Amino acid sequence: MIYCDKFEYQPTVKTLDEFEEIHNGAAFEKTLVAFIHAEETDESDIKSVETKMVKNLKWAAKKNDTKSVLLHSFAHLAETKAEPNYTKELFDRVEARMKHADYACAQTAFGYFMDLNIQAPGISQARIYKSF
């Protein structure tokens, strides 16, 4: 997770045909961006993974004094990865729970490579790694 003063994305190459077409990017300010990689083993218990993810996102957002969270699929971090439909469902569930808890929560374009523009402060709590 990286707390960003500014985070912008623009979809460039669609990599997963089964997901919606997205042509426009977006920009966010003072947001916690979660670079998320769902692993194959996560598929056995979506509820547990969802709960742990929400808990960690809330904790990291609080550490950075923000109520804004952005979920970004980053499926390049491990040797195995979950099926794309599982990962998208996980993102949708987490987004709904975060919004229900009064956080502004969104997702980057799922199934795309994208151009990123990141401005992040050089403070320790702005970069957090968590595996569960």
Image (cartoon, rainbow, N blue to C red):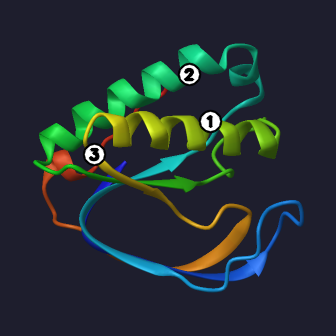
Pick out the residue farthest to the front. Answer: 100
Q: Between disc 3 and disc 1, whose residue precedes?
A: 1
Q: Tags 2 and 1 in contact by the CB under 8 Å rule?
A: yes
Q: Between disc 2 and disc 3, whose residue precedes?
A: 2
- Judging by the rendered image, the residue that carries numbered circle 1 is 90
Residue 132's spot in the image, x, y percent?
Answer: 50, 21
Q: CA distance from mark 3 to mark 1?
A: 17 Å
Residue 132 visible in this rendered orientation of the protein: no
Task: State the SS at label 2.
Answer: helix
Taking the spot 68% from the left edge, 50% from the top edge, the residue there is 75
Q: Nearer the viewer, mark 3 or mark 1?
A: 3
**Residue 23 higher or lower than 103, as above or below:** below
Crowding around mark 2 (Cα neighbors within 10 Å: few <14, some 14 to 19, many 20+) is: some
Query: Between residues 99 and 77, which one lies in front from this camera angle?
Result: 99
Crowding around mark 3 (Cα neighbors within 10 Å: few <14, some 14 to 19, many 20+) is: some
Taking the spot 70% from the left edge, 32% from the top edge, the residue there is 39
- Judging by the rendered image, the residue that carries numbered circle 3 is 103
- Three-letter amino acid code of the residue under disc 1: Leu
- Three-letter amino acid code of the residue under disc 2: Val
Task: State the SS at label 1.
Answer: helix
Among the 4 quarters of the image, the one containing residue 68: bottom left
- Judging by the rendered image, the residue that carries numbered circle 2 is 49
